[in-house]
Image: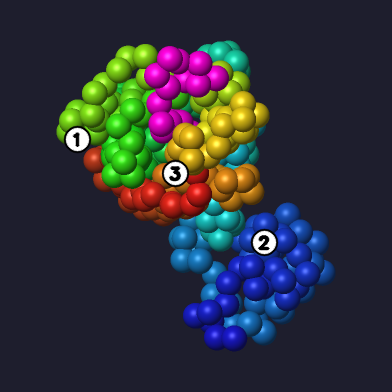
Amino acid sequence: MTSKSATIKAVAKRAGVSTTTVSHALNHADRVTPELRERVLQAAKELGYQPNPYARSLRIGRTGLIAVIIPDICNPVFPEMTRAIQDELAKAGLDTVIYNTDVPAGMSTVHVSHYRSYFRAKRFDGIIIADPATLDTESEFENLELPIVRIGNSERTPMDQVCIDEHGVGYDAARYLIQHGHRRIGIIAGEQRFFTGRETLRGYRDALRDFNVDLDDDLIFAGTYLRPAGVEGIQYFLALKNPPTAVLAANDVMATAAVGATLDSGKRIPQDISIIGIDNMPQTTDIRPALTTVDRELRAQGRTAAELLLRRLTGDKTNMPESVLIPHHIVERNSV
């Protein structure tokens, strides 16, 4: 194996350790035993492994820790995203500490206030925030003097961002249903306090308008991004005198719950009603019928956020925040 093809995972496998241990051995020798470090170095030598250039350029005196702030640790979206962040930062010898602000329970203000002392004490080299983890607490991060990257579209605080075209996601999902012959389309909307929820709903409305499909307010159910909203939303739609023939759920958590509730009611998918979700969570391939969904590239979001942060840590001192747009696409399965 040449140095170009050798990876940190290959070194970890050869040495019989984790990728984090490899990073420590190569970049923070005091965190592993001399024997373990020698084993890792030998494996790296045998494979011709070359450390990530970010790791070599990180300045001495850093803590080696990155804070990753997520809104809901129970939502499968965020472990998928966080894993990508961890993998990318580990290549540079950095560890991640995950903070959950528990936004669905309304605890973000309490938790962020509690975490603030750690951030202000500069116990971290940088912070990655996944929206809407800091709902109503954005001002807490304005004067931290730490590199910060936000995953999601910030409407207030200028900072490096990994953006998703949330309007386009809602628009393309609704358009997909229209192109499959549906003219009566419901939406289990996301929480309207969140930018994502508002933009997805706006995209849905715009698609219906652009394709001359009647917009019926009875076909908009106020969801929460949580599982119960998927059940309640589909039950509401099926009880209408003129129910929709298709439903867009604003995330896969609600969509998969809606699939189960639909089948429990005796209805067939997609023969009686079609359902499309958003996120392309791994679980969407496990249910039957497998869920058609919009892939928002969760791992790409996390990986890109880590890359942006590493650029700041290794010398990019430009004052202009950088914004990277992550593409999305429809994943066709069997629920439409």
Closer to the N terminus: mark 1 or mark 3? 1
State which quarter of the image contains the N terminus. Answer: bottom right
Instruction: Answer whether residue 246 is magenta in the image.
Output: yes
Mark 3, residue position: 336
Vertical placement of residue 321 versus 37, above or below = above
| Residue 291 or residue 194, whichever sits in front | 291
State which quarter of the image contains the C terminus. Answer: top left
Mark 2, residue position: 19
Instruction: Find residue 20 and report its horizontal and vertical position in percent.
Output: 67, 57
- Amino acid of disc 2: Thr
Chain part drawn in magenta? 235-252
Q: How far apart, in angstroms, are the residues tagged by discs 1 and 3?
A: 19 Å
- Classify 10 Å Cα crowding around label 2: few (below 14), some (14-19), many (20 and above): many
Taking the spot 30% from the left edge, 32% from the top edge, the residue there is 183
Q: How far apart, in angstroms, are the residues tagged by discs 1 and 2?
A: 50 Å
**Residue 295 makes an appearance in the image:** yes
**Position of 135 compared to 259: left or right?**
left
Taking the spot 18% from the left edge, 30% from the top edge, the residue there is 212
Mark 1, residue position: 211
- Classify 10 Å Cα crowding around label 3: few (below 14), some (14-19), many (20 and above): many
Vertical placement of residue 12 versus 286, above or below = below
- Amino acid of disc 3: Val
Instruction: Find residue 139 and report its horizontal and vertical position in percent.
Output: 39, 18
